[in-house]
Image: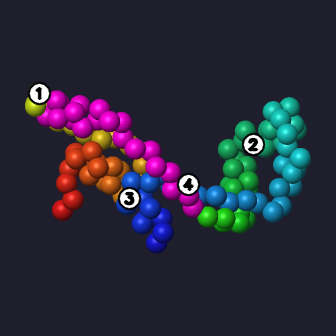
Amino acid sequence: MRLLEMSSKGLRCLGFAYKDNLGELSDYSSGSHPAIKMLQDPACYSSIESDLVFVGIVGLRDPPRDEVGKAIKDCEEAGIRVMVITGDNKSTAEAICQEIRLFTKK
């Protein structure tokens, strides 16, 4: 529930976890380490990324630039339809769009 609360305020959320048993990655220190092959092999990703211990979530504020509002207004006045394409979580994107007044809260 905390994730939704943070993302709906326009925060970009990152989850943190660690792994107790790193196996051959336990002493990984550089790209010349023998385990680099394991890290570069997509078939190994699921084993590397499993059995993680969740630590928590942090929300990062990345405010829109000051000029965004005027740019949107200028586009609309010129008849240009403004659209947002983002990799953000849906609720984060909606909160940011409300903040820049691209659309209003219903």
The mark that comes first in sequence, 4 or 3, is: 3
The mark that comes first in sequence, 2 or 3, is: 3
Mark on residue 78?
1
Task: Please state which amino acid type lies under the numbered disc 4.
Answer: Leu
- Closer to the camera: disc 2 or disc 1? 1
- What separation in Å lies between label 4 and label 1 (alpha carbons)? 38 Å
Mark on residue 39?
2
**For residue 46, side relative to residue 74 (left or right):** right
- What separation in Å lies between label 2 and label 4 (alpha carbons)? 21 Å
Mark on residue 92?
none
Label 4 secondary element: strand
The mark that comes first in sequence, 3 or 1, is: 3
Q: To which residue does mark 4 refer?
A: 14
Residue 51 location, x and y as percent? Answer: 72, 65
- Closer to the camera: disc 4 or disc 3? 3
Label 1 secondary element: loop
Task: Please state which amino acid type lies under the numbered disc 1.
Answer: Ala
Mark on residue 9?
3
Residue at horizontal 83 percent and vertical 61 percent from the top = 21
Q: Is residue 69 one of those drawn in magenta?
A: yes
Task: Please state which amino acid type lies under the numbered disc 2.
Answer: Leu
Residue at horizontal 87 percent and vertical 51 percent from the top = 26
- What separation in Å lies between label 4 and label 3 (alpha carbons)? 14 Å
Task: Please state which amino acid type lies under the numbered disc 3.
Answer: Lys
Quadrant occupied by the C terminus: bottom left
